[in-house]
Amino acid sequence: MEFKEKLISSHLAFEEDLNLDDSVHETRASALKVFEEKGFPSKREEAWKYTSIEALIQKDYALFPKSEASINVNDVKKYFLYDTDTYKVIFIDGIYSPFLSNTTHDGLDVCLMSAALTKPKYRELINTYFNKIAPEDDSLTALNTSYAKEGAYIYIPKNIVAEKPIEIIHFSSGNENALWLQPRNLIVVDQNAQVQIIERHQSLKEHPVVTNCVTEIYVHQDAFLDYYKLQNDLPSASLIDSTYIVQEKKSHASVHTFSLGGKLTRNNLRFFHKGEHIMSTLKGVTILHGKQHVDHATLVHHAQPNCESHQDYKGIFAERSEGVFNGQILVDKIAQKTNAFQQNNNILIDDQATVNTKPQLEIFADDVKCSHGCTIGQLDEEALFYLRSRGIPKKEAKALMTYAFANNVLASVQLPSLKKRINGQIAKKLGVNLGFDL
Amino acid sequence: MAYTEEELKKELETKEYEYGFYTDIESDTFPSGLSKDIVRKISEKKGEPEWMTQWRLKAFESWSEMEEPEWANVNYVKPDLQAISYYSAPRTKPKYESLDEVDPELLKTFEKLGISIDEQKKLSGVAVDIVMDSVSVATTFKKTLAEKGIIFCSISEAIKEHPELVKKYIGSVIPPKDNFYAGLNSAVFTDGSFCYIPKGVRCPMELSTYFRINQAGTGQFERTLVIADEGSYVSYLEGCTAPSRDENQLHAAVVELIALDDAEIKYSTVQNWFPGNKEGKGGVFNFVTKRGICHDRSKISWTQVETGSAVTWKYPSCILKGDNSVGEFYSIAVTNNFQQADTGTKMIHLGQNTKSTIISKGISAGKSQNSYRGLVQVGPRAKNARNFSQCDSLLMGNECGAHTFPYIEAKNNSAQIEHEATTSKIGEDQIFYCNQRGIDTEKAIALIVNGFSKEVLNKLPMEFAVEAQKLLEISLEGSVG
């Protein structure tokens, strides 16, 4: 049986223990119809021109893990930001792990999607926010919606500043042969509230796992969202991550994506502007080797005047890795005085590495400042020679330059401990010890 | 009162197509529709050898299975391809010894364009192969060229006289199966130009052809084949204007360039077909396939000034097959009223040390949509490939749109690719600066638009630059000059 058929036929079993009377059921059912009709995206679709998930869906993935896996805190501690106190929402094989987590309802809600979807006190919120910005015609997002059940639910009320960062981590234990995960997160940052969130998907054993994750984020007036995605998974794990963000006026939202590992990673990141004076930041560093594949598909939809967006993606590709950048800036007719910037720089280290980039501007307003730049190149031979002439070995010199290349993305990371962590990971990825703290 | 952008906008909208006139020459027209029989009939009518007929039929067969592409960023009512007459030629085909014998009606047409053959002949020494509808009716300077061994004639003549060259190269760069409109063209092309420059010859003059769509309801399917043999050089000019017509006219041309080792081809186009009136009615559909192939150390340079047509769908491309070959693309695309343009280039780097440059300037006014769509592809064996792309858009008024769709694919680590794009309007501060130096707003806008497109205008051959300026003026009258 094809995997698509399995997904469709398993849906009944999935809904067995769920309340079929509520509106969420209807959302799920209609989403399943969309998926049934559209199926998995193929390379024939423009948005998936450079990324094929054909090979991924050939396997027979388990949709519901058989048993609850227990994992030792000490085994996974290294994946936490252990030196900083954080709220944690931890899932193992898609199932919430109360033992590892640290949730709260004190002043702000850091809890579970399953609770939000079923408990009556969240009903209104779910009706207002759930599946309101996720595009209905995107087949993978629809698939996620049809199986939406668990994930992180975060609500920061008016004028509240979350005093601790929130970590959302999805572990896959490797108990199943092959696993298909579909977490669904909902984050609402109310007026003038602030929050920092770190999201991570991690498999603990080499085994085929595909995560089709959807996150919806609402950033209200004057609110502030700082979101980090750490993607440094094992080479057997794939991730399709779709994040949809709506911003109200005068809000700030920034998303940093660090793609350092995994087999195939697709990042759909979309921003919609609903007010004036909005600032959006999208930044990313991608460092790949082996046969890894990372695809960044971004969209910033400027629908209101006087907004600003800033995109900066750096890619370093070694061996046979493949990088894709598909950035889109859409400026509506009324979005005058828009200031949109997009930059994508890539370095190809080895012969076999590939970069496909497609930075797009679609502009319907005249009084705008929109530009994009995109480069593909190598490390500067002369700079390399200069460093070596100063006694820095070639490998370190290269690493230093690569680090410098990625630096202005790292510079805007607001959490010091996270920054240090990423620096360490980058140094490790480049295979050097620079002998000093970057 | 000072001239404002508002006024400019208004003027642009109301600006009618100046070259909308119709030359009254009797035409010999086929019944409309397309079938195997029509293809055969076209071939027969032109007295083509059997291999050409077969080639057309094969193209027709593969075309029948193709679908009209829809990926371009343009909206239009698809032309009914069965309602088009696929052959239209002036009934009498006189052979001219001198220009005096040319139909005075025809000469008048060119006079209206401000580029009479006489003037061209005297002033610039350009050999003009005039294509009036589909059959060439006058060729000048043939003798001078013949002395050098250069073949410059209509493609139908070339099929008869130089079958070995045509057979070898036609469809070699753009095979009939390439795309829908190239397939259609391959099956039904009625005429076009053929040019062959022998080894080591530098063509002493700019070669030029003027295409015009004349007969109402006639599709124009031109086929151009330019072959530059080893070490040769040629500069080819193509200019187009079309009379005003209410129904949409289809133009699906194919241009193939072949630059053999060490050769250089410079291909310049000025296109000013009827863009439709200010309500967006009428206008020419321009679906053109242009591509060149570069062998070792050769160079192909495309320069285009696109001001006309209701819908443009055009991507002059270079396949940089040979080592050390160079591809260039310089373009100005101006859209106004309801015009839509989706244009750009493809640079396919296959050989080592290949270089390409893309400079694209888009100016949109009125309610028009202007898109740049380009591909830079570096193959795995294309060591040290170098590309620089720059796409700038200028928006006038808030009802138009400018779009950029660059595709960049690098499969080699030694590739160096740069791409940058900007979109802006004419800055108030720029105008203010000019104003306070005593330059009025109209002049200031002209100055800025001129400066904006200068990089491309400079690439045009002298003879053409004047005309290009003129066309820019018509498209954006009030803003230029």
Image (spheres, rainbow, N blue to C red):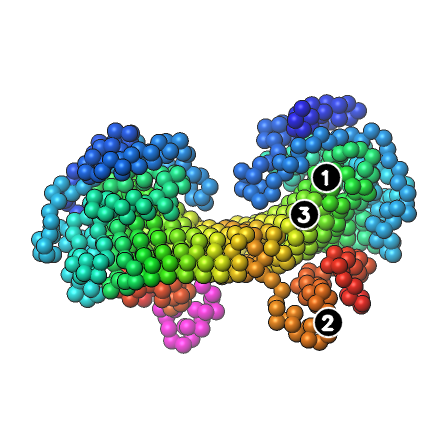
In which quadrant will I find the N terminus of chain A? top right
* Total numbered badges shown on the rendered structure: 3
Which residue carries the number 3 mark? A292
Residue B383 is at least partly visible in this image: yes
Residue type, mark 3 in image = Gln
Around disc 3, counting alpha carbons within 10 Å, would you say few (fewer than 14), some (14 to 19), or many (20 or more)?
many
Circles 1 and 3 on the same subunit: yes
Q: Chain of mark 3?
A: A
Which residue carries the number 1 mark? A211
Residue type, mark 2 in image = Ile
Residue type, mark 1 in image = Thr
Around disc 1, counting alpha carbons within 10 Å, would you say few (fewer than 14), some (14 to 19), or many (20 or more)?
many
Tell me the quarter of the picture where residue A381 sits.
bottom right
Instruction: Give the residue displayed 56% in from the left and 43% down from the top.
Output: A49
Q: CA distance from mark 3 to mark 2?
A: 30 Å
Please provide the residue range marked out in magenta.
B426-444
Which residue carries the number 2 mark? A392
